[in-house]
Image (cartoon, rainbow, N blue to C red):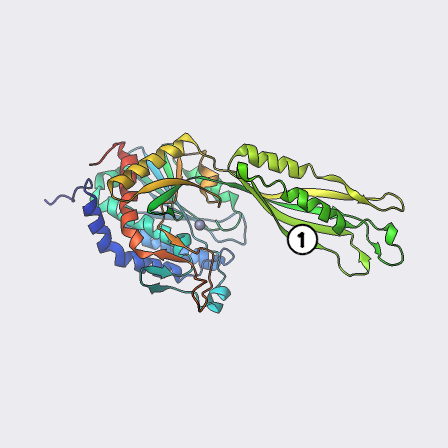
Amino acid sequence: MSRAPSVSNPAHLKAFFEAQLPDALDLLRQMVGINSFTLNPEGVNRLARFTAESFAPLGFSAEMIPSANPRFGQHLVLTRRGRGAKSIALVSHLDTVFPPEEEARNNFCWLIEGDLAFGPGTHDIKGGTVMMWLVLKALQAHAPEVFESITWKLFLNSSEEMYSPDFGALCRERMDKNTLAALVFEAEGRLGKEHLMVVARKGRATWRVTVSGRGTHAGGKHPHGANAAVQLGLLLPRIAALTDYSRDLTVNVATVNSGTVLNRVPHEAVAEGEFRAFTSEAYNHCKQTLLALTGPGDVFSPTDGFRCTVKVEILTESRPWPRNTDTDKLGEIWKQAGHETGYPTNIQERGGLSDGNMIWDAVPTLDGLGPWGDNDHCSERSADGSKLPEFVEISNFVPKATANTIGILKLATDRVSLI
Ligand SMILES: [Zn+2]
């Protein structure tokens, strides 16, 4: 009886992945060919069914769970029950930020040029889902006892690119008690020769400031007015000044709207924006300071003292994922796996959100397991090459899948070193 080649030799894994790469790229091509813009639920559901079919030969059963928001497609949970008590969760998402009309307008579709595969979702995050598939195939072929012993749960969010807190609740509810880790397959970072795993992400809140003034005829009754636009204009620099780079706290004033016609003192003015921070302290400080702006304003009518009023609302919130020891331990395992496989690996804290923000305090979470790419969320290509759309680097799949597989084996077997 022939034994599976030893996993202790990364060269065997690399050879396996080299052989799988054409199938992996074909899988990615098909996934990219299905438009799965967050607000295209039919497309998202189609991709969910295709993904379920793609993982079925590995022994995964599928469950589709409706989103809390009826405008979104269904979340996908794929499960393969193991013989042992331990479980590992792998997290990705189905949706992209590209509407079908935009893909058509920019002729943005699957295209291989040299070492780069362009297309909607290649980098964020269909390349990551294909990475999951590669790693699970390798575990099945090269470490069958580990593959069979672990309960694998794959969670794919239908609406990661928009606000979907119900997916976080779904993961927390469905993840087994003995879940060793939640591994998120968003793309890795890169700094020089180092590949960067994500160990912290900023929290983000969106906000709206509404100023109510008193409208009046700008000619005949000017003093009767309480100008909401002027009041809002006084507030915005104060809000922007909450940014504190020394605390990694950023506040963005994004949209400002006021007034209707020019012969009228505006009765209402509205601004919206967001803020982000890594630590709960900075995040909560900013939130409380913003909310405290609610109340009477500074601008009033000289006629009778009628004063503008200010209302501040927090529209959505994704809590910060701060540095923590559980995540740092996973980061160490991946650094070591990278070291042993000739794939220099380090860690980073990232400003953008992922599903990791919603689960890091339920189970140890590491992010950045996906392949490297760039220009995510961009669909345009300019003739002079100064604008390039989203792509993933093809030659990254084999070494990254090798490092991920060794990392997962270390995690699953508690072995410090496989060499
Ligand atoms: Zn993503």
Residue 224 in percent (x, y) is at 87, 50
Q: Is residue 57 visible?
A: no
Q: Is residue 335 above or below residue 44?
A: above
Residue under the image location 19 percent in, 39 percent down: 8
Residue under the image location 38 percent in, 58 percent down: 31
- Residue at numbered disc 1: 256
Q: Is residue 260 left or right of residue 134?
A: right
Q: Is residue 168 visible?
A: yes
* Towards the viewer: 393 or 12: 393
Hey, what amino acid is under mark 1?
Answer: Val
Q: Is residue 15 above or below residue 177?
A: below
* Towards the viewer: 194 or 124: 194
Residue labelled 1 has its Cβ within 8 Å of some atom of ligand 1: no
Q: Quarter holding the N terminus?
A: top left
- As drawn, which residue projects farthest toward the top? 325
Element under label 1? strand
Residue 284 in percent (x, y) is at 58, 34
Residue under the image location 44 percent in, 56 percent down: 375
Q: For the residue carrying disc 1, how many other residues have a C-alpha within 10 Å: few (<14), some (14-19), or many (20+)?
A: some
Q: Quarter holding the C terminus?
A: top left
